[in-house]
């Protein structure tokens, strides 16, 4: 192909690429982008902060001791995490729509200006890419859909820092523009009739209100299942609240491969500590002093449900084998596969009176899917760490 034909093809391609002047809507621009961006920044900040707490809660030995109460602490923080991430989806889409003309602006030819232009575009690409990755994978995780092979927890945590760091950098660069845009009125003065007025065009205020409503509807549709009177509107919630004994499950006894073990008459709970090993049958555990507490199962996907659990306080079992107030415990399940077949309970949780080796739920023996013959239930902990089908508790010195 000769140079003339190549030039013609290039010209036709360039003609098809939109230019900033191709977009004529007055709704686009800094005044829309700044106002949507403020709430998008709030949503990302809440998601980032609660995500850090969730990640720390799942570490075997977090750097700082996490609080054991209130018992609904993780339930609230994870609900905020999922709700803020969900709200960010329509906010991000409107934000990108409002600034799209600037994204297709032709780069300048001057070398210095070109370098600055490319750096700005690169930072925006990093921010948008990380934000989209976090939102898409986070929503997929809420639906328990994993069409990837990487470790979601580690990757989501790492990209969270990238997304939030990019956001802080973007805000710092654009702060003067944002301040000017927020100081201007939302809408232009009403045009005089007959002088270019377009009575059919929506106002910028209308667009913003539609954006806020869309974000609110998205949150209610996905996260309102636990709010009184709003369960019916949570049509996209990943859990309905129904399940054995009124509490839904993520992993069933069949899925964990423990069904054949649950009816073993020789089952014993092994408790291992500094003074030796003690084994308890189910009847012996039932004969011990019991404690009951209303505690939630709050999962990383954002759903939660509460129940009245009763059983033996973990600290009582630890004391029988010489464990002290500074000791952690490792709780092991009968399931032989899965990332959460054991969990570590920090010392402050061990000593909390509401940390139970639960034997009943709602006054009835545990359903197999809830961990029969016994399971760990502790306040303010992620559901994945509330180990089911427990076979062993081992005291470990920190």
Image (cartoon, grey):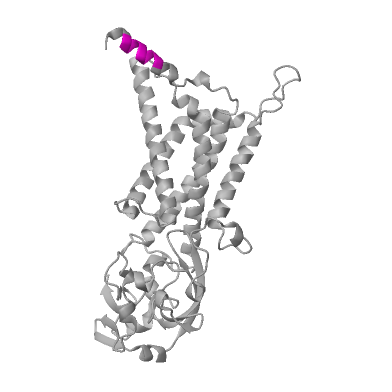
Report the magenta stretch's main SS: helix
Q: Quadrant of residue 339?
A: bottom left
Position of residue 260 measured from the top left corner of the image (x, y, whole percent): 31, 80
Quarter of the picture holding the C terminus: bottom left
Give the residue furthest to the top: 4
Position of residue 104 measured from the top left corner of the image (x, y, whole percent): 44, 24
Position of residue 288 measured from the top left corner of the image (x, y, whole percent): 40, 90
Quarter of the picture holding the N terminus: top left
Q: Is residue 347 visible?
A: no
Position of residue 19 measured from the top left corner of the image (x, y, whole percent): 47, 20
Front position in the image: 326 or 85: 85
Q: Is residue 312 visible?
A: yes
Query: Looking at the image, which residue is at 60% across and 43% down?
Result: 212
Is residue 59 positioned above or below 20 on the image?
below
Q: Quadrant of residue 252?
A: bottom left
Q: Which residues lie in the magenta part?
A: 5-12
Q: Quadrant of residue 2?
A: top left
Query: Looking at the image, which residue is at 34% across and 55% down?
Result: 153
Give the residue furthest to the right: 193
Query: Looking at the image, which residue is at 36% across and 27% down?
Result: 119
Front position in the image: 357 or 391: 391
**Image side of residue 102 versus residue 332, left or right:** right
Q: How many marks?
A: 0
Is residue 249 positioned above or below 151 on the image?
below
**Image side of residue 210 versus residue 133, left or right:** right
Front position in the image: 8 or 24: 8
| The magenta stretch spans residue 47 | no
Is residue 127 positioned above or below 73 on the image?
above
**Image side of residue 314 versus residue 75, left or right:** left
Is residue 38 positioned above or below 243 on the image?
above
């Amino acid at each position: 192909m000769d140079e003339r034909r190549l030039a013609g093809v290039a010209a036709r391609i360039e003609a098809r690429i939109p230019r900033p002047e191709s977009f004529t809507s007055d709704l686009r621009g800094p005044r829309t982008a700044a106002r949507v961006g403020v709430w998008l920044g709030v949503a990302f900040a809440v998601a980032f902060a609660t995500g850090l707490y969730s990640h720390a809660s799942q570490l075997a030995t977090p750097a700082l001791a996490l609080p054991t109460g209130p018992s609904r602490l993780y339930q609230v923080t994870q609900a905020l995490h999922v709700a803020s991430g969900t709200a960010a989806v329509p906010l991000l889409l409107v934000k990108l729509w409002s600034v799209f003309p600037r994204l297709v602006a032709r780069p300048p030819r001057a070398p210095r200006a070109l370098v600055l232009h490319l750096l700005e575009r690169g930072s925006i690409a990093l921010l948008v890419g990380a934000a989209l990755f976090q939102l898409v994978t986070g929503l997929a995780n809420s639906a328990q859909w994993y069409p990837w092979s990487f470790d979601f927890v580690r990757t989501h945590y790492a990209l969270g820092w990238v997304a939030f760091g990019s956001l802080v950098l973007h805000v710092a660069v654009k702060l003067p523009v944002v301040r000017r845009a927020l100081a201007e009125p939302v809408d232009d003065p009403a045009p005089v009739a007959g002088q270019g007025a377009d009575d059919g065009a929506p106002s910028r205020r209308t667009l913003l209100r539609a954006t806020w409503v869309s974000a609110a509807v998205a949150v209610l549709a996905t996260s309102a299942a636990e709010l009184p009177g709003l369960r019916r509107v949570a049509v996209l919630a990943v859990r309905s609240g129904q399940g054995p004994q009124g509490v839904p499950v993520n992993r069933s006894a069949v899925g964990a491969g423990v069904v054949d073990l649950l009816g073993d008459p020789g089952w014993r709970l092994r408790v291992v500590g500094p003074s030796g090993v003690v084994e308890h049958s189910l009847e012996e555990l039932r004969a011990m002093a019991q404690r009951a507490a209303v505690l939630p199962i709050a999962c990383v996907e954002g759903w939660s449900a509460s129940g009245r659990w009763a059983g033996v306080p973990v600290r009582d079992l630890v004391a029988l084998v010489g464990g002290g107030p500074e000791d952690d415990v490792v709780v092991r399940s009968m399931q032989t596969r899965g990332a959460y077949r054991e969990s570590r309970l920090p010392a402050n949780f061990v000593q909390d009176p509401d940390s139970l080796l639960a034997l009943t739920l709602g006054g009835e023996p545990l359903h197999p899917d809830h961990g029969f013959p016994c399971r760990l239930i502790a306040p303010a902990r992620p559901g994945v760490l509330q180990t089911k089908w427990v076979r062993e508790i081992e005291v470990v010195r920190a």
